Amino acid sequence: MALLEVRDLHTFYGSIEALKGISFQVDEGEIVALLGSNGAGKTTTLRSISGLERPRSGLVRFAGQEIQRMPAHRIVQLGLGHVPEGRRIFVNLTVEENLSLGGYLLRRTPHEVHLRRDEVFERLPRLLERRHQLAGTLSGGEQQMLAIGRALITRPKLLALDEPSMGLAPILVHAIFQTIAEIRKGGTAILLVEQNARQALRLADRGYVLETGSIVLQDEAKALAENRRVQAAYLGGEPEVAL
Amino acid sequence: MSVFVQYLVNGLTIGSFYALVALGYTMIYGIIRLINFAHGDLFMVGAFAGWLVVAAGAGMHLPVAMQLLLALLVAMVVVGLLAMGMERVAYQPLLKSSRLAILITALGVSLALENGAMIAFGAGFDTYPANILPLSGFHLFGAQVGYVQVAMFGLAILLMAGLYLFVQFTPVGTAMRALSFDQDAARLMGINVEGVVLITFLLGGSLAAASGVMMGLYYTQINFMMGFLMGLRAFTAAVLGGIGNIPGAMVGGLLIGVLQSLSAGYISSQWQDVIVFAVLILVLVFKPTGLFGERVVERM
């Protein structure tokens, strides 16, 4: 059964229709990549699922519950984590405070928060070294790790990641993708929005391609990587191969 | 020297009242970017709530200490709830619309509170019983310091310290700081943003009410318009300290109190507000981020 099911989702910004009725699903333990160029609606899709945008119509079902009208903080509670575009860590708070906020839902059991924070430190040891530093002083890669770690504290069933490799050096991109693979091994399904389509398709099981608010292609990741249209548009495929 | 110390003592006393009100301005601005023009009027409602309790307590022949304690607690609870209601009814529906809409609404709420109080309590002055507090005190560098002044200053500092600890060390306080920085990210942490905003209004309202009761006891006269000038002075204090910054509001309040007291003493009490508001203009022109304010980041 699908962990996340999206059916005919329409989201508007004012009078502009950013999502024109998209449908897709993520199964348990799966990595699903959402590809598309700037402005295709990838970020809007994630925001509509996690409750930051209110879709005008359509259905979002997560872990058996309809969530399209649910406030964002309740959706997190159900086990849907969202690491937003641009990381959005709290740069005015320390690394430790950022992680504690990730465990805000568990605030009545501080012991549990500490436990899970230590788990995150174990998985992402760079953060442990910097636990008392203000998050704003971290490097880009460390900030991305912190954003992911912050979302992991609630042990989400599904983690939606928006451009986790954006603006990072290649070696860090590699590290981030490795982390994502490890998270999936822990049983968390992943919905991955990426500019770096090549890396994303290497990691993902399946993928969807968004163009101006509609899904135009969907397939196994391998098949997408070999699709000539995808290669030309998103993998920088050389024209002679495409022809 | 002794005169200067006297002005300083008086200034710190009223400055602590300003600081309590300034905190509400700064907290509310910090989390929803609203200058809540009705905030000064919450202070006024607090003064009247306390006045009613003191009057009722005197009627029941309660001991003075009990009257004062009750007045403070009732005023803080009532005004805290009023502030929450105000947010829920007038501001929350407008949080996603333009800044101007909510600002104008705040002016409307202010007028409603002022005129509501005028209808309820009349346009004249009401007085707290003058003989309720001891007049005794002690001498410090030749200045007369009342025990009442010390107690009020102490209480104000206690409330401010409590607020500071709440904001720094509790999960809800951390959530307040987080959502002041990034509302969407806060939502993704599972923070009920609407709930935290309500708690902020509750805290801001009760601090303003405590200030109102103390001001009423200190000057004895209260009036439905008393929140207007207080609001402007406290706003100046918040801007001076750096709007959005909690320690800034505390220091700003005390500074404005002292400045007002010194200018009333050395120049003329008719000039005190001219000088205070000149400071507002100077700060806005030369250091709009205030004494403690961080660089203002334009957010999308």
Image (cartoon, grey):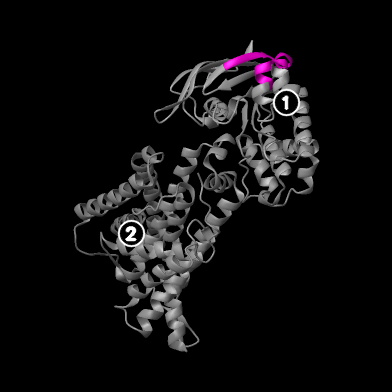
Q: In which quarter of the view is residue A227 placed?
A: top right
Q: Which residues are magenta?
A: A216-231
Residue B211 shown left or right of residue B187 in the figure: left
Q: Residue at x 44, y 52 (%)?
A: B204
Vertical relation: B241 (above or below) B204: below
Q: Nearer the viewer, residue B42 or B239?
A: B239
Give the label on residue B47, or none: 2
Three-letter code for the amino acid on which mark 1 is drawn: Arg
Chain identity of mark 2: B
Crowding at label 2, few (<14), some or many (≥20) Cα neighbours within 10 Å? many
Which residue is labeled 1 in the image? A198
Whether residue A32 is visible: no
Whether residue B120 is visible: yes
Instruction: Give the structural element (helix, strand or loop) at label 2.
Output: helix
Q: Residue furthest top?
A: A1
Q: In which quarter of the view is residue A73 placed?
A: top right
Percent x, y for residue B286?
47, 69
Queried whether the magenta region covers residue B25, the answer comes back as: no
